[in-house]
Image: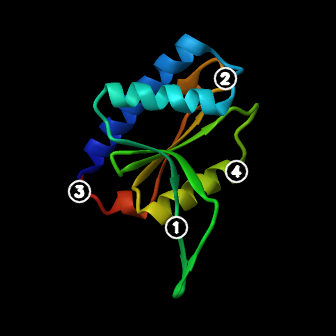
Amino acid sequence: MTKREITELSYAITGCAIRVHKNLGPGLLESVYEKCLKYELEKEGFMVQQQLNVELFYDDLIIDTALRVDLFVNNLVVIELKTVERIMPVHEAQLMTYMKLLVAPQGLLINFYTDNISKSLRALVNDFFKILPP
C-alpha cells in the first residue's frame, strides 16, 4: 500500500459522502448517514465494516469496551461521522485514537450537519501513513 493509494481511496470515500449529502441534506440522525454511506461505498466495491468493535489492549490486559468505529473501509481508512454544529478537538482525538488502535494510516472525520461536505471534512493521517512509500 502506498500514500497515493490511500489518498485515492479517501477521495473516493469523499465522493460517496458528497453523494449522500446531496441526496439527503443536513439535519438527519448520524445513523441514517452511516447506513447510506455504507451502501454507497459498497456499491463502489469497497469492503466496509460498520460499527466495528475496537479492542483495547493495555499492557497484558484486553479491556472490554464499548468503543465502536462508525465505518472502516478496506481495513485502511477509519470514518467517523458526526452531525454536529461544530467539530471539536475531542472529535479529532477520538478519530486519531481509533486509527492507532486499528493500525489504520488514515481517518476521515465527516460532519453531515453542513452545507458543504468538502469544506467541513477533515482527513487525518498518523505515523502509519508517514512510513508508507509515496
Q: Residue furthest right?
A: 85
- Which one is earlier in the sequence, the residue at label 4 or at label 3? 4
Q: Please state which of residues 88 and 29 is positioned toward the viewer in this rendering.
A: 29
Q: Which of marks 1 and 4 is in front?
A: 1
Q: Residue at x 48, y 57 (%)?
A: 99
User: How many dots with numbers?
Assistant: 4
CA–CA distance between discs 1 and 2? Answer: 32 Å
CA–CA distance between discs 4 and 3? Answer: 29 Å
Residue 89, label in figure: 4
Q: Which of marks 3 and 1 is in front?
A: 1
**82 with respect to 77 (left or right):** right
- Which one is earlier in the sequence, the residue at label 3 or at label 1? 1
Please name the residue that numbered disc 2 is placed on: 114
Tags 4 and 3 in contact by the CB under 8 Å rule?
no
Q: Please state which of residues 93 and 55 is positioned toward the viewer in this rendering.
A: 55
Q: Tell me the element at label 1.
A: loop
- Which one is earlier in the sequence, the residue at label 3 or at label 2? 2
- Which one is earlier in the sequence, the residue at label 1 or at label 4? 1
Q: Tell me the element at label 2.
A: loop
Tags 3 and 2 in contact by the CB under 8 Å rule?
no
**1 with respect to 120 (left or right):** left
> The disc labelled 3 sits on which kind of residue?
Pro
Q: Which residue lies furthest to the front in this view?
A: 64
Q: Which residue is drawn at 45% across and 32% down?
A: 38
> The disc labelled 1 sits on which kind of residue?
Glu
In this picture the colour scheme is rainbow
Q: Residues within 10 Å of mark 1 (few under 14, many from 20)?
A: some
Residue 5: percent from the left, percent from the top? 26, 43
Please name the residue that numbered disc 1 is placed on: 55
Please name the residue that numbered disc 3 is placed on: 133
> The disc labelled 4 sits on which kind of residue?
Pro
> The disc labelled 2 sits on which kind of residue?
Thr
